[in-house]
Amino acid sequence: MATWIQDIVNPAKRGWEEFYRNRWQYDKTVRSTHGNNCTGGCSWMVYVKDGIITWELQAIDY
């Protein structure tokens, strides 16, 4: 079988794809606010992985 066909049928492992998928995984979500010098008190959905905040989105129902 030609090499380029083999690459389509059974592609080589691409580590960057696994890294990207792992980047957006999380264990749980919690609600939080940004307290320091914030007068609005906006609500945030915080995504936590292994006890560390990985990313957050502003909650739309605050």
Image (cartoon, rainbow, N blue to C red):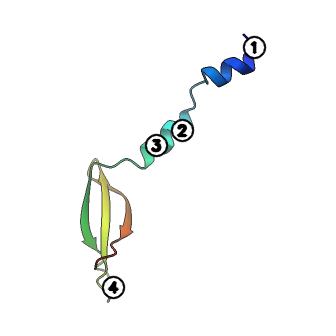
Gap in angstroms between the C-alphas marked 1 and 2:
25 Å
Q: Assign the N terminus to one quadrant of the image.
A: top right
Picture disc at residue 2 = 1
Element type where label 4 sits in the image: loop
Residue behind mark 3: 21
Q: Residue 16, image x and y in percent? A: 56, 38
Q: Assign the C terminus to one quadrant of the image.
A: bottom left
Residue 60 is left or right of residue 28, and the answer is right
Gap in angstroms between the C-alphas marked 1 and 4:
61 Å
In the image, what residue occupies the spot 54% across and 38% down?
17
Residue behind mark 4: 38
Is the residue 58 above or below the residue 10 in the image? below
Q: Residues within 10 Å of mark 2 (few under 14, many from 20)?
A: few
Q: Residue 25, image x and y in percent? A: 37, 47
Residue behind mark 2: 17
Is the residue 33 above or below the residue 53 in the image? below
Does the residue at mark 2 contact the one at mark 3 (Cβ under 8 Å)? Answer: yes
Does the residue at mark 3 contact the one at mark 4 (Cβ under 8 Å)? Answer: no
